[in-house]
Amino acid sequence: MSKKIKIVFAINNFSIGGAQRLYLDIFKTINHNVFDLHLITLFQPREEDFYELVPPYIRQHKVSFKSFLDINSWWKLARILVLLKPRVVISSLFFSNTVMRMLKIFFGYKIIIIEHNTYIYKGSLHIFVDRILSRLTCKIIAVSESVKKFTIKQERIKAQKFIVINNGIDINRISKIEDHYSDITQLKRELGFSSNLKTIINVGRLAFQKNQKLLINAFAEFVQKNNDYILIIIGQGSLKNKLLAQIKELSLDKKVFLLGAKRNIIPYYLISDFFISTSLIEGFGIAAAEALCCGLPILSTKTAGIDEMIKEGQNGFFIKKAAPKSVARDMEKMVDFLESVNRDTIIKSAGHFAIEKTVQEYENLILECISKKQINL
């Protein structure tokens, strides 16, 4: 039997998030007869995380960087790489991408990085670093066509460096969970919600880019005519207290619920009527794809990834204007749409994003990078 190919997946941390969820699904799906996977995390989160969901056959290596100049952590990471001798490193997020690409000079592995978003707030120094280090990079995975186009323009990196691989969702896992919860009325009660109320769901970090402030203001307008609806927001983040204050100020304490991070979001999709996103930027939108897989239509701002996901009038609509009254009108449009929605059509539209397809493309890319004798600097 030939020796397995050792692969390191590196990331800033393993707190609950889309990039981390992608890693988990790749870990469970990739061909373990061919690839020996390891996970390296560079910071240890103080919030909810996914560590306990990492399969036991994936070796975890934790480093606790205090800053970019934390010499002790650099040495610890270097010792890990000396022991592992990975053939390929796959990295996500700026800090991890920077560190792992710099160490590539000394350890000689091939490196692939993943661009997860349209980072409109990236500073000029970060852009410069990414452009220079792209020369050490075998390939840059863009999670959507829009992310690819944006990053090429922003960082002035040659298009040949990029490959588009959509994030994937575990459709089989979602289907099994759906089958388990056949009685939605009972599920609502189990989750603490009245069975006669209708539910709108938003999933995302409580952060500026997710723009839940606009969502809550819009819901305040919407609920005046639609008092049988509630809004649930799943996610954790630095804006929690500000959003709670906003909810209280608008007297929405019994209508808007911040539920925090959830390792298993599927039951909350199942009790919901439609999914909404008011994000300023996205890269792909794993939460939106999972919502489609659960048969939920989507109402969203036209952000990267979701711009390829929504087929207006079939599985959802785009928000026309990012203003509270306008978003509220779009929410009312979704209420009308629910009367004629074809759930099977919505579920079918998620099929393109099966994790098996994503992992096959990752496997092909890994083998392609290994076969390259050199990288043009």
Image: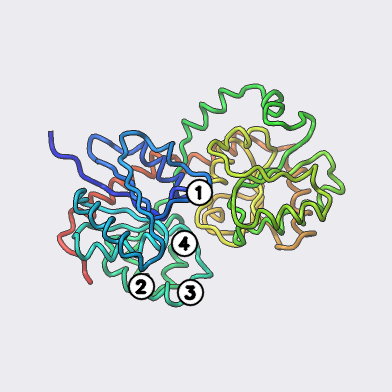
**Residue 194: % across, % down:** 77, 31
Q: Name the residue beneath numbered marker 1.
A: 17
Secondary structure under tag 1 reads: loop
**Residue 347: % across, % down:** 56, 36
In the depicted view, which residue is nearer to us: 350 or 20? 20
Q: Are marks 3 and 4 in contact (CB under 8 Å)?
A: no
Ranked by sequence position, the earlier of labels 3 and 4 is 3
Mark pair 3, 4: CA separation: 17 Å
Q: Residue at x 57, y 40 (%)?
A: 262
Please tell me whether residue 83 is drawn above or below residue 301 in the rendered image: above
Ranked by sequence position, the earlier of labels 4 and 2 is 2
On the question of residue 271 being in view, the answer is yes
Specify the farthest residue to the front. 72
Q: Name the residue beneath numbered marker 3.
A: 123
Ranked by sequence position, the earlier of labels 2 and 3 is 3
Ranked by sequence position, the earlier of labels 2 and 1 is 1
The circle on residue 147 is 4
Amino acid at pointer 1: Gly
- Front of the two marks 3 and 4: 3
On the question of residue 314 being in view, the answer is no
The circle on residue 131 is 2
Amino acid at pointer 4: Val
Quarter of the image holding residue 268?
top right
Q: Residue at x 35, y 43 (%)?
A: 359
Q: Quadrant where the C terminus lies? A: bottom left
**Residue 118: % across, % down:** 50, 64
Amino acid at pointer 3: Gly
